[in-house]
Amino acid sequence: MCGIVGFIGNKNAKDVVLNGLTRLEYRGYDSAGLSLFNSRYQTFDVYKDEGRVQKLVDSTKNAAFSNIGIGHTRWATHGRVNKENSHPHYSQTRRFIIVHNGVIENYQQLKDQYLRNTILTSETDTEVIAQLIETFSQTLSVEIAITTTLKLLHGSYALLVLDSNDPEKIYAAKYKSPLIVGQGVDGITVASDLMALIGYSTDYHALDDKTFLVARKEGIRLFDLNNESLDLHFKPIELDDQDTTKGEYAHYMMKEIHEQPSVLRRIVTNYYEKEKSLIKSEILESIKSSDRLYILAAGTSMHAGLIGKQLIEKMTSIPVEVHIASEFAYQKPLLSKNPMFILVTQSGETADLRACLVLINQHHYKSLTITNVPTSTLAREATYFLELYAGPEIAVASTKAYVAQVAVLSLIAHELSNQSIDIRKELSIAATSIENFLSSEEILPLVREYLTRRNCFFIGRGLDYHVSLEAALKLKEISYIQTEGFAAGELKHGTIALIEEGTPVIALISDPKINNNTRSNLKEVQARGAKTFRIVMESCKQDGDEVILENVHPLLTPLVMVVPTQLLAYYAALERSYDIDKPRNLAKSVTVE
Ligand code: F6R
C-alpha cells in the first residue's frame, strides 16, 4: 500500500525512481510524485499529481539531471486523491522533503501539540512528519531531529527524507511498513520492495523495525532509534527482469493465470527431493504437537485458508479454525490449550495479519507464515515460514498465489497424514489439467452470454463452496459486478429472494457425491428465472455442461476449479474495458489496518 523509492549514486535518479515506481505501482495508484535536486537553485523540486506514474513520466520529461531523488505512488488513507495530498510533501520552509508509506494514527494529536503555528498544506498524516522534523531540526542535528520525530509516531511508516541543506543524503526509516535498501555499482536504492531494485542493485538489506539509515553515494550507515550504529546484512537479489514483465500477455493477470501449472511444478521441485519432503521436520512436529491450528488470513488468502482447513482436517485428526485476520486481531476467540497459528499471505506485509502476529508473539505461541515473499515482515517475525514459490505476482487480483497457497497447504496436510497419496504425482496431474484447460478455454462467449447484469452468484458445496467464495471475490474486484459466493444448499434460506429473470448463477461441481444436490439447487434458481451454467469436473459431467475440467485427486479439485472462474473475472473486466491489473480503490499489499 503505497510504494516508495529513493536513489543516490552516479545515475540520473529520475530514471531509477520512475522505473522503480512503475514496478511498485501495484501497491497504490491514486497519485504519483517525485523530488529531484535542482542544482541551479540548490533546492529540491517536487513533481506530483493525481493519476498514474506514466503521467509523472510525462511531466518530468525535461527535469535536469539529479543524482539524488525520492518518489512515491499513493493509495490514499488520509485525505482525498488530489495533487495537494500526493507525496512528496515539503516541510514549511521547504527544507525537508518526505515520502511515506503507512498511517500515523496520532497525527492530529502531534499537530495539536507541536505544530500549532505551522500551516499545513495537505490533509495527510505524512505532512506532520515533515513539519516535526523541521521543528526539531531548529535545535537538534538532522539525524537526532528525525529519530526524535520517529519516537513520537504511533502507527506505521516506511519513509524517506531529503534535506535541502545537505542534498547528498537520503534518510530512511521503517516501522511496520516494509523497506529495503539495495546497493549496486551505480549507487544505492531504497524502496518498498525488491522489484524496484531490479537492474540497479545486486544485493539488498531488509530493514528491521525501528531502524534508521543514512544513504550517501559513498555508502550506507544504519542506526537504531537511539542513534547507535548497527550492522547491515546484505543478500544477493535473485529476481530478474523476466519475472516482472508481461511477456506475450496483454495483462499481468492473464500471464499469472497461465503461470499456474508451472507454479505447481515449482512447488513440487522445491519441496521434494525425490520422495523426501523438504518441509523442516520441526515445523511438522510443532503442528503435530499442537491441539488446534488457527489459520489467519485476509481476502483471497483467507479463501485458500478455508481450503487448507478442509485438507488438513480430511487428511489428519488435527482440528483447524480459520479466522479473518482483521477480526481475530481485536476479537480473539477462546483458544485451545496448545494452539499453533498459520498465517497465509501472498505479500507477507498485510497489516491486519501483522496485528495478529504481534499478539501471537506476545503470548509466545508458535506460528508459521506461508508467503510468496521470504523477505517480508510476516516471514521474518513468525517462528517458521514456508515460501510459495509463485514468483512475483503483480496483478492486484491474486491468482497464482492462491493456487500456490492451496498447494502448499495440501503439502502440509499430506506430510501430517498417514494417507498414501502420491502428492507429487497428484499435483502434477492438477498442473496438466489446468494446462489442458487453458490451452482450449472458451470462456469469453460465456461471459458475453451470461455476465451481462449488475449481479451474479457462484454456488457450490464442500470444497466447491470455498472456491465459489474466491470466484465471487475475483469477479467483483475487477469487473465491479456485485457477486456472492454461496453454499448451494443455503441459497433457498433467504438469498434466493434476489434471483430474478436473467440473474446469472454459476454452479461449481467437482464432487460426484453431491453432484445431484447442487444440480437440484440450480433447478430451484432456474425456476425463478436465473440464467445458469456449470463448471464441472469430468467425474460429474452431464449433458449440456458448459465447462468441463479433467479429473484430479478429489482433495485437489480447488486448484483446477478456480481457474475458469479467474478467466470469467478477467474477460468480464476486459469486456467492460476496465483496468484489469489495477482495479479501482485497491492495492496489492495492504499495509494499513
Ligand atoms: C484479492 C486479493 C486480496 C488479498 C488480501 C490479503 O485478489 O489479492 O484479497 O488476498 O488483501 O493479502 P495477502 O495475501 O498479501 O495477505
Image (cartoon, rainbow, N blue to C red):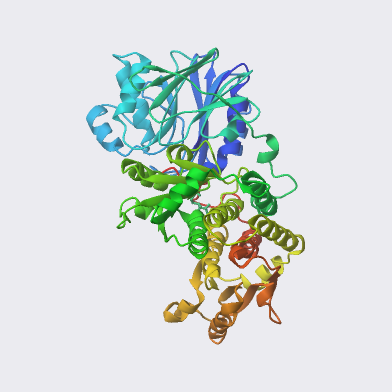
Where residue 537 sits in the image (x, y, percent)? 66, 71
Out of 170 and 94, give the one closest to the viewer.
170
Residue at 48% over, 79% down: 489
Where residue 303 sits in the image (x, y, percent)? 50, 59
Out of 278 and 493, give the one closest to the viewer.
278
Residue 559: name its quadrant. Answer: bottom right
Where residue 502 sits in the image (x, y, percent)? 58, 79
Residue at 53% over, 85% down: 524
Above-or-below relation of 207 to 104 = above
Where residue 530 sits in the image (x, y, percent)? 56, 80
Out of 571 and 592, give the one closest to the viewer.
592
Residue at 28% over, 14% down: 139
Say whether residue 28 is visible.
no
Q: Is residue 549 left or right of residue 28?
A: right
* Count of numbered circles on the image: 0
Q: Is residue 286 left or right of residue 110?
A: right
Out of 405 and 181, give the one closest to the viewer.
405
Above-or-below relation of 453 to 592 = below
